[in-house]
């Protein structure tokens, strides 16, 4: 089904990842993992290892870091507890990347664009971000780790398209990891990578990104370019 914004304009669904794409949460993620590992007397992963699994759901991320036979669920619980504690500490704010808020404002004002989220974060974490940024009611579809298999399974994007009525050819996924790009390819939608996140541009291209943008101005142009 193709929806019309007005007369001859087809709606486009623009789906954003959160961590590493809209929000710079790397210090929060690394520290929360470090504290979770410490609970079980385990050596913390390196910073590179910590950031390499951003985008996966928590259980899948910890399974990568400690192996499937490790204390995966317990680590995930300890990580959530550490994340909550960090929110009350100075120096661990989750700031938007420069330009993110402005581009979201530009896109929200375009009647031909619907906005969505597809993230490995919990719905509670996403709701907190939306409240903090004053983005209530802005995203027409929000898909989180709570209700889907981990990326790169295409479930989040497929559900977002079903909820908005937008077909694959009118949908674009924007993210910073190979998991985002692989998910987009699996769902049959456009994949745009961002260079400021947690996986290198070459890896994003290898996973199917049609482009890797250098900043949010570049992203805006790329979104509006017909594929």
Image (cartoon, helix red, strand yellow):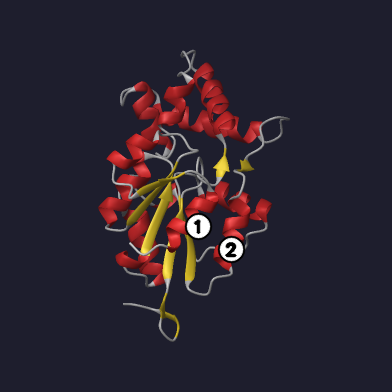
Q: Distance from label 2 to label 1 (Cα)?
A: 9 Å
| Residue 73 or residue 50, whichever sits in front | 50
In the displayed structure, 47 sits above or below 1; it is above
SS at badge 1: helix
Kindly indicate the quadrant of the structure image that contains residue 86.
Answer: top right
Residue at the spot 35% in from the left edge and 40% down from the top edge: 204
Residue at the spot 59% in from the left edge and 53% down from the top edge: 127
Give me the disc on residue 196. none
In the displayed structure, 94 sits above or below 219; it is above
Mark 2 and mark 1 in contact? Answer it, CB < 8 Å.
Answer: yes
Kindly indicate the quadrant of the structure image that contains residue 159.
Answer: bottom left
Residue 174 x %, y %? 43, 51
Q: Which residue is mark 2?
A: 106
Kindly indicate the quadrant of the structure image that contains residue 120.
Answer: top left
The answer to whether residue 150 is visible is no
Residue 196 x %, y %? 50, 38
SS at badge 2: helix
Placement of the N terminus among the 4 image quadrants: bottom left
Residue 30 x %, y %? 53, 26
Q: Which residue is mark 1?
A: 220
Residue 11 x %, y %? 42, 73
Q: Earlier in the sequence, mark 2 or mark 1?
A: 2
| Residue 19 or residue 103, whichever sits in front | 103
Placement of the C terminus among the 4 image quadrants: bottom left
Residue at the spot 35% in from the left edge and 67% down from the top edge: 170
Residue at the spot 32% in from the left edge and 52% down from the top edge: 184
Q: Residues within 10 Å of mark 2 (few under 14, many from 20)?
A: few
Specify the farthest residue to the bottom.
7
In the displayed structure, 169 sits above or below 33; it is below
In the displayed structure, 158 sits above or below 71; it is below
């Amino acid at each position: 089904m193709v929806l019309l914004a007005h007369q001859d304009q087809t709606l486009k669904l623009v789906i954003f990842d959160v961590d590493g794409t809209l929000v710079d949460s790397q210090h929060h993620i690394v520290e929360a993992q470090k504290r979770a590992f410490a609970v079980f007397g385990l050596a913390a992963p390196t910073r590179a290892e910590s950031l390499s699994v951003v985008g996966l759901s928590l259980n899948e991320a910890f399974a990568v870091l400690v192996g499937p036979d490790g204390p995966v669920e317990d680590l995930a619980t300890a990580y959530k507890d550490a994340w909550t504690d960090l929110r009350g500490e100075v120096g661990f704010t989750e700031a938007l990347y420069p330009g993110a808020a402005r581009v979201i404002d530009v896109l929200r004002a375009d009647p031909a664009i619907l906005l969505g989220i597809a993230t490995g974060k919990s719905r509670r974490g996403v709701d907190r971000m939306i409240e903090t940024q004053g983005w209530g009611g802005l995203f027409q579809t929000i898909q989180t780790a709570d209700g889907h298999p981990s990326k790169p399974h295409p479930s989040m994007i497929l559900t977002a398209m079903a909820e908005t009525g937008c077909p694959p050819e009118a949908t674009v996924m924007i993210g910073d990891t190979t998991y985002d790009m692989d998910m987009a390819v699996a769902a049959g939608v456009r994949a745009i990578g961002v260079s400021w996140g947690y996986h290198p541009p070459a890896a994003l291209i290898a996973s199917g990104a049609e482009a890797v943008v250098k900043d949010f101005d570049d992203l805006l142009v790329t979104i509006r370019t017909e594929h």
